[in-house]
């Protein structure tokens, strides 16, 4: 396929013809003129080709090769031929997607400036724009955002309401979202029920209000929208269900481990960190047994606190079953690599250092000690299996155990 030759006009917006280009240390200066011969009067719309005069417009455009670009547009003034038009002389107009009548930047650059200001704000966007060789100030970025304005407000029918932090632990506000269109529609200055009620009262078409389990927004929604249905939002439902499940599992872990045959822990197979946790677990179990023993003998909470020296809150948790079996094991950084490690181990690679070096090639960022401890535990766990295979089977548990 024959390649077309490079033309300077490809660097400038559509419809312009390059007259000259100067490349300097501070940027690129390109002089252009519009290719069109006629223009329409902005007042009466009549087409004119009678040129009155010419002048220069200085514009900013997209950077080239890491250098800012300035365009010098040779613009024309036309005479209006409309008999009843009061506009005798007007400036030639360009395409709306190329250059605005009073614009100081091309439309394609204005589009980037707008999105930078919308995404980053004033000062952060100005700092980032300077790195992109787009010399715009923070005020210019904010003006570009305000100039386009906000989209048309559509009255919502399903809203979500929750609090958010202006500054965590110090000042909070209220956020309202249109759940059907998945967009934020209002930010209130505080989280007082009266403020939320005033906003909701102005939107009587709302049929469903999704909120958290707090009572403040519930009261505000009930007073402002008595006919609206209030529902708990999905995040809080999942969060509450997760807490309830974990709490129930903590209280029943002893029975669960006994049921699956994991009630006994072999300290020889634990890592150093797991052994420290296990020793703390044993100390906590001794404390729990002492408190439960006193309670079984009829001692009340006050008497148990006096005799053991533990706090009232701790004694209450033990008696309610909220502190039993809390041997916590941290999730290992090897969790996502265990299948790969098992395959390497089955293939005969039992050296921890070599496994660690190979594992780093797969993205592992942990230390050599983590892999070495895994290899040591694996090696210890396989020793009983080797004894069985050598003809010395271990005695199984009795029926009474």
Image (cartoon, helix red, strand yellow):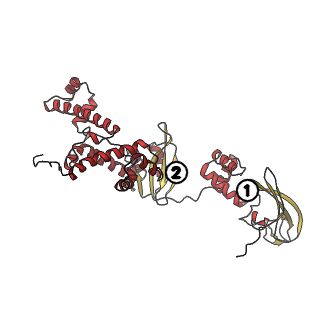
Q: Farthest residue in the right direction?
A: 52
Q: Nearer the viewer, residue 158 or 227?
A: 158
| Location of mark 2 (residue) | 186
Please tell me which of labels 1 and 2 falls first in the chain. 1
Q: How crowded is mark 2: few (under 14 residues within 10 Å), some or many (20 or more)?
A: few
Q: Nearer the viewer, residue 30 or 84?
A: 30
Give the numbered dot on residue 354: none
The residues bearing labels 1 and 2 have C-alpha atoms spaced at a distance of: 42 Å
Residue 368 location, quadrant:
top left
- Would residue 88 be visible to someone looking at this image? no
- The secondary structure type at the circle numbered 1 is loop
Q: Is residue 2 left or right of residue 261?
A: right
Q: Nearer the viewer, residue 297 or 139?
A: 297
| Location of mark 1 (residue) | 65
Q: Residue at x 28, y 31 (%)?
A: 313
Q: In this view, does 173 lie to the left or right of 230?
A: right
Q: Residues within 10 Å of mark 1 (few under 14, many from 20)?
A: few
- Quadrant where the N terminus lies? bottom right
Horizontal and vertical percent for residue 356? Answer: 43, 48
Horizontal and vertical percent for residue 72? Answer: 82, 58
Against 228, residue 37 (above or below) is: below
Q: Nearer the viewer, residue 346 or 161?
A: 346
Horizontal and vertical percent for residue 102? Answer: 77, 58
- The secondary structure type at the circle numbered 2 is strand
Q: In this view, does 112 lie to the left or right of 160?
A: right
Q: Is residue 208 left or right of residue 247?
A: right
Horizontal and vertical percent for residue 202? Answer: 49, 53
Q: Residue at x 24, y 45 (%)?
A: 253
- Would residue 24 be visible to someone looking at this image? yes
Count of numbered circles on the image: 2
Marks 1 & 2, CB-CB < 8 Å contact: no
Q: Farthest residue in the left direction?
A: 400
């Amino acid at each position: 396929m024959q390649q077309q030759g490079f033309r300077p006009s490809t660097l400038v917006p559509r419809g312009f013809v390059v007259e000259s280009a100067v490349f300097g240390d501070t940027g690129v200066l390109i002089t252009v003129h519009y290719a069109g011969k006629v223009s329409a009067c902005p007042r009466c719309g009549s087409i004119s080709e009678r040129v009155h005069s010419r002048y220069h417009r200085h514009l900013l455009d997209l950077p080239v090769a890491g250098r800012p670009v300035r365009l010098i547009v040779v613009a024309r003034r036309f005479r209006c031929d409309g008999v009843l038009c009061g506009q005798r002389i007007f400036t030639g107009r360009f395409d709306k997607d190329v250059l605005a009548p009073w614009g100081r930047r091309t439309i394609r650059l204005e589009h980037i400036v707008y999105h930078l200001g919308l995404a980053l704000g004033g000062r952060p966007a100005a700092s980032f724009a300077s790195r992109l060789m787009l010399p715009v100030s923070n005020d210019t970025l904010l003006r570009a955002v305000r100039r386009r304005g906000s989209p048309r407000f559509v009255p919502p029918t399903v809203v979500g309401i929750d609090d958010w932090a202006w500054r965590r632990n110090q000042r909070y506000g209220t956020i309202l979202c249109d759940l059907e269109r998945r967009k934020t529609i209002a930010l209130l200055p505080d989280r007082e029920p009266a403020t939320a009620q005033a906003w909701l009262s102005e939107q009587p078409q709302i049929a469903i209000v999704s909120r958290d389990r707090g009572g403040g927004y519930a009261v505000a929604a009930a007073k402002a929208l008595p006919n609206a249905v209030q529902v708990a939002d999905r995040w809080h439902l999942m969060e509450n269900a997760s807490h309830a499940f974990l709490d129930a599992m903590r209280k029943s872990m002893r029975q669960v481990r006994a049921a699956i045959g994991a009630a006994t822990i072999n300290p020889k197979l634990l890592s150093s960190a797991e052994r420290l946790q296990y020793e703390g677990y044993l100390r906590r179990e001794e404390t729990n047994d002492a408190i439960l023993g006193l309670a079984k003998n009829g001692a009340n909470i006050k008497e148990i606190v006096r005799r053991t020296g533990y706090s009232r809150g701790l004694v209450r948790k033990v008696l309610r079953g909220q502190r039993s079996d809390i041997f916590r094991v941290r999730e290992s950084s090897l969790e996502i690599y265990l299948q790969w490690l098992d395959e390497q181990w089955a293939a005969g690679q039992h050296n921890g250092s070599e496994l660690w070096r190979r594992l780093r090639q797969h993205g592992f960022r942990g230390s050599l000690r983590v892999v070495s401890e895994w290899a040591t535990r694996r090696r210890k766990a396989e020793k009983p299996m080797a004894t069985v295979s050598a003809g010395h089977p271990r005695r199984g548990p009795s029926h009474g155990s």
